[in-house]
Image (cartoon, coloured by chain):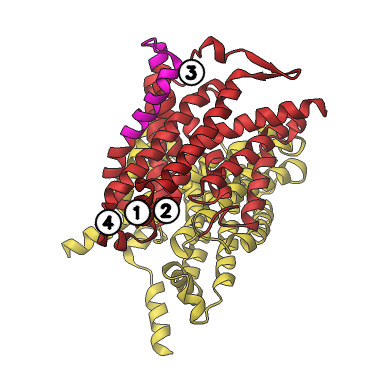
Chain colours: A red, B yellow
Amino acid sequence: MLSSLGGVLFDGFAYGMLLFLLSVGLSVTLGMMNFVNLAHCSFAMVGGYATVTLVGKFGWPFLATLPMAFILAALLSIPLERILYRRLYRASDLDQCLLTIGIVFISVAAFAWFYTTEQQSTQVPAWLQGSVKIGGMSFAAYRIFLIVLGLAVTALLIFLLERTRFGATVRAAVDNQRMARGLGIDVDRAFMFTFALGGGLAGLGGALAIQVVGLDPTFALSYLVYVLIVVAVGGLGSIGGSFAAATVLGISDMAGKYYFPWLGAFLIYLVMVALLMWRPVGLFGKR
Amino acid sequence: MASANQYFEQQTRWRPLEIAFWLATLLPFVAAPNYLSLASQVAITALFALSLDLLVGYAGLVSLGHAAFFGAGAYTAGLIAKHYWTEPLTGLLIASIFSGILGYALSHIIVRFRHLALIMLTLGFGLLLHEAANSASPLTGGADGLQGFRVPSVLGFKFDMFGRAAYAYSLAVLFVCFLVARRIIHSPFGLALRGIRENAVRMPAIGAASQAHLRKAYTLAAVMAGIAGALLTHTTSTVSLDVLSFGRSADVLVILILGGAGRLYGGIIGAIIYMVARDQFSGVNPQYWYFWIGLLLVAVVMFLPNGILGGFSRFLKRIN
């Protein structure tokens, strides 16, 4: 049991990084703009299907499709924000929930129409397929890749939001919209870019998820719960919090599946409910 | 005080349109005898939506896990029918009591939260119960559902394939529950609930026992949802794991919003439209049914903020 502990920890951490990449975009939009966007995983699905199509139909290399997954999901989120989301920034939680559930339903049916309901897969380069032996233990190369990418995105995001002019603009627009407008900050533009960033990150996560959990049109619903758990437990708008929550969730999910398979997802939900009752604003939430 | 009493009396007076509506619910017996089992499904869904209306429409509590109580009622009624007796009315009573107790217990947690935490907790409890029922397969039958029992009749009327007794039973229970809900909504307690919905901070400040009110509303909604679940069990003689699913919670929310929340009839109108439309369209392309529901949902949120009934009453005002 102990010898497998390292493996479970490693796999769980890699899975956590995947969950982090999927959910950090939602943490940014929900935390910064206070919008309950249940359609977040629909953007992830856009990225996932973009990769499947580019690799399968056009023969692109897997790595080259990842930026495209980001860009396509980000581009798609801009008109959606302009037309639909923007009008509901001040609406109730319920209206925001309903609008975005509607978008989820539409996306599930639309992808089922174009790609059928079958599980999709994609081809990754040979050097990502095998495993690497380090100190007598073997680690799957793709999972190492996920971890490296997850850490890189975390660093980049923290830098972007805390150290650049764009980050300062967004934070100002969120903290006090009227004041920011008064200072000549284009708040609408800041929100649009934030939203596109969130959608793009989801698209990247969706593309990376294909190799680990597969992709079918119900992805938007089945992973929604995980993403929401990460964001709610981590605390809104806290990138470090999402990172911590995704790691805990990934490891406990892996450990649960390995050691207590009969419990199913019960453990995850129990952990989430307990954590939320203890800290309703999340582990690292401020508001 | 007289004026306050007059206000409540005026609120509770039956309008001609309401009486016409309830008389029209008897129409399927003569006009569409082949669709009576669909009609009983509609009545059950309407009752479920009515119970959610007490929470969402009147108390202002969002719930993404209301199927928990529907499922609790359905499984309780199913277990009683399978292991003890098949008389439905007592089963209905026990199922409603059980889901009421569950609702009361959870309400102590739920009413303390707002915003995202509230949404996530209701979702979380719903999923927990779903997983629990899935895992406890010796008791619940797991993913196969609870089978192997038959509820033969209610008060001597046999449940047959035409669904006459099923519809009469569902409709009667719906009507009784509706009367109770109507009485509650137009009571001072109902008024207090609406006050909490409108301003959750001011109500405690003017001395209303805000949290106690919300707990009561939550328990009542759980009781009604449990009754709806038990009705489904009795009229179909099976319980599938689907009664606890997230899809059911989402569906009932869609139905309520479609009809118009906070209007008592919204859930019923929504259930009629949704269930009949699904029955008509599912034959054509079942997979893409949700596309249209999604589109409808987006349209309702963007253009008809108070649902179909809200749009209807605005239309009536305009032509008057």
Residue B293, placed above or below residue A85 = above
Which three-letter amino acid code belongs to the residue tagged 4? Phe
In which chain is the residue bearing label 2? A
Sequence order check: which comes first, mark 3 or mark 2? 2
In which chain is the residue bearing label 4? B
Q: Quickly name the residue at label 2.
A: A34
Secondary structure of the residue carrying tag 4 is helix
Relative placement, left or right, of A200 versus B232 is left
Secondary structure of the residue carrying tag 3 is loop
In which chain is the residue bearing label 1? A
Q: Check if residue A189 falls in the magenta segment.
A: no
In which chain is the residue bearing label 3? A
Q: What label sits on residue B312 in the rendered view?
A: 4
* Residue drawn at (35%, 34%) of the image: A74
Q: Are marks 4 and 2 on the same chain?
A: no
Closer to the eye: label 3 or 2 = 2
Q: Check if residue A66 falls in the magenta segment.
A: yes
* Residue drawn at (77%, 31%) of the image: A259
Relative placement, left or right, of B138 versus B249 is right
Residue farthest to the front?
A: A163
Which three-letter amino acid code belongs to the residue tagged 2? Asn
| Crowd rating for badge 3 (residues with CA inside 10 Å; few <14, some 14–19, many 20+) | some
Q: Position of residue B258 (x, y in %)?
A: 37, 49
Which three-letter amino acid code belongs to the residue tagged 1? Tyr
Q: What label sits on residue A120 in the rendered view?
A: 3
Relative placement, left or right, of A197 versus A242 is left
Closer to the eye: label 1 or 3 = 1
Magenta residues: mostly which secondary structure? helix
Relative placement, left or right, of A175 versus B248 is left
Q: Position of residue A18 (x, y in %)?
A: 55, 31
Q: Quickly name the residue at label 1.
A: A89
Q: Nearer the viewer, residue A142 or A122?
A: A142
